[in-house]
Image (cartoon, rainbow, N blue to C red):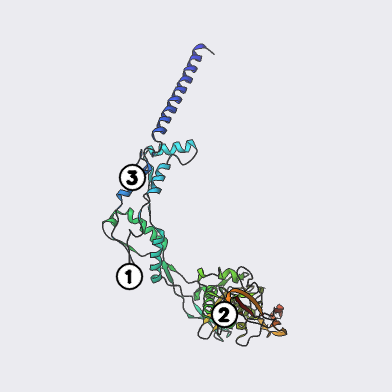
Amino acid sequence: MPLLLKKLVLGVNIFILGVTALAAITSFGFEAYYQGKIYPGVKIDNLNFGGQTESEVARYFTAKLSLPGKIVFKSPTATAEYALDPKKISLRYDVRLMSSRAFSVGRQTNNFYDDFLQKITALGGTINLPLEATFDLARVTDFEDMVDQEVAVSPTEAQFKFESNSGPDQKGRVVAFKQSKNGRQLDREKLETQLKSVVLNQACLRGNCNFTLPITILPPKITKSRADQLGITSLLGSGVSYFYDSIPSRVENIRVGTEKINGSLIAPGETFSFDTAIGTVSAIFGFQKAYVIRENKTVLEDGGGVCQVSTTLYRAVLNSGLPVIERVAHAYRVPYYEEGGFQPGLDATVYPPSPDFRFKNDTPGWILIQATFDEANSKLTFDLFGTDDGRQTVVSTPVILSTTPPPPPVYEDRPDLPAGTLQQIDTAHWGAKTVFTRKVTRNGTVLIDESVSSDFIPWPARYLRGTKP
């Protein structure tokens, strides 16, 4: 290589090294200066906070905050107004979020190139972060609960009845005797967005701040037109049970459980799970303590009485000629399920998540479950509406094959009860083996031909016996 060219290459290398060294020194100095500070050019609401610390940003917005005397939400459907004091919910700028976001520009990744681009972008003045607001969510939730109690209305589902010999083919039809109506509830997410906008809207800060109460419309699941579209044109079958002499908490659990099942739609080919439909059975979802059978004892527990709902639905399914996928009889004969003249063996126990009561919709159309909870007459009815495919169902009356007397009473000594005390906590029940048959046919073809057995074990009376001196 000629000497001149060698000198030229050497000079270029020295220049590059010099520029690199200068850039490194400059970069080191830049980073040292902005250590703990926001990089230059970073804006919040068009204000440049470059060179300031997170604490300085927080102090600026804390001092800047002013609030209206009250925030008023006006009902769109009535003249009602709901006032909220912004100080009581601690409405404020979210200074921690805003300052940390500003400080994180150029420091978000471990990638030097990406962070460098963010810094350059900030210097160009194109990083402008929005204002953010926050509040005490628990206090806002209390306000929302209060408002929703006044404005919320559950949707009204269409209620149907079957009119015999009223269709064009004189086979009868399903008609609506109670039309559906929309419901409404408070749109909590939108209300909370409106609250946050108060500190962002300067016009709102010069006096009282007014909003229209955000409402969400809740359409009913079942309307007459939707029922027609789904092929729900016929009554497939019904089931009935009675709950005379049930304690108030059991009656309430029957009502709550019925509401959760009522209106369910089952697609063709779908298997319906009672446990899935009713969900979690606990006080959180409105269930009260009543007697259930658990671990060979009758005990008080949330949801006692839900089996009245599953039993009644089971009877409707039997009469509708639908395939039963899963059904479990109760451990012992429960008197409620023999009220109204029913023989033992037409019951279905559930205890989410297991045991479950499941059946399949093997008809060509959708099936609608509709219930009537008649508290005045202690009567529960389930009607299954759908597409009549011509099936015929015959369910025999259950036959008691044998009975077994209850075993001797069981006594549990309790040192916390005075000696001589005897408290009965469970009643005796005779055991029984029962069976009934069901045959479902369509145009001479047998669809179901089954024998359903139940084995109810003899059940002892149980007592708590005091042993305390």
Label 3, residues with CA under 10 Å away: few <14, some 14-19, many ≥20? some
The vertical placement of 284 against 68, above or below, is: below
- Report the amino acid beneath label 3: Asn
Sequence-earlier tag: 3 or 1? 3
Between 149 and 317, the one nearer to me in the picture: 149
Disc sitting over residue 46 in the figure: 3
Asked whether, in this view, residue 151 is left or right of residue 163, the answer is left
Spot occupied by residue 191 in the image (x, y as percentages of width and height) = 38, 61
Residue found 46% across the figure and 25% down from its top: 20
Between the C-alphas of marks 3 and 1, the distance is: 39 Å
The kind of secondary structure element at disc 2 is: strand
- Report the amino acid beneath label 1: Ala
Please, which residue is most extreme toward the bottom here? 341
Q: Nearer the viewer, mark 3 or mark 1?
A: 1
Residue that mark 2 sits on: 382
Asked whether, in this view, residue 363 is left or right of residue 194, the answer is right
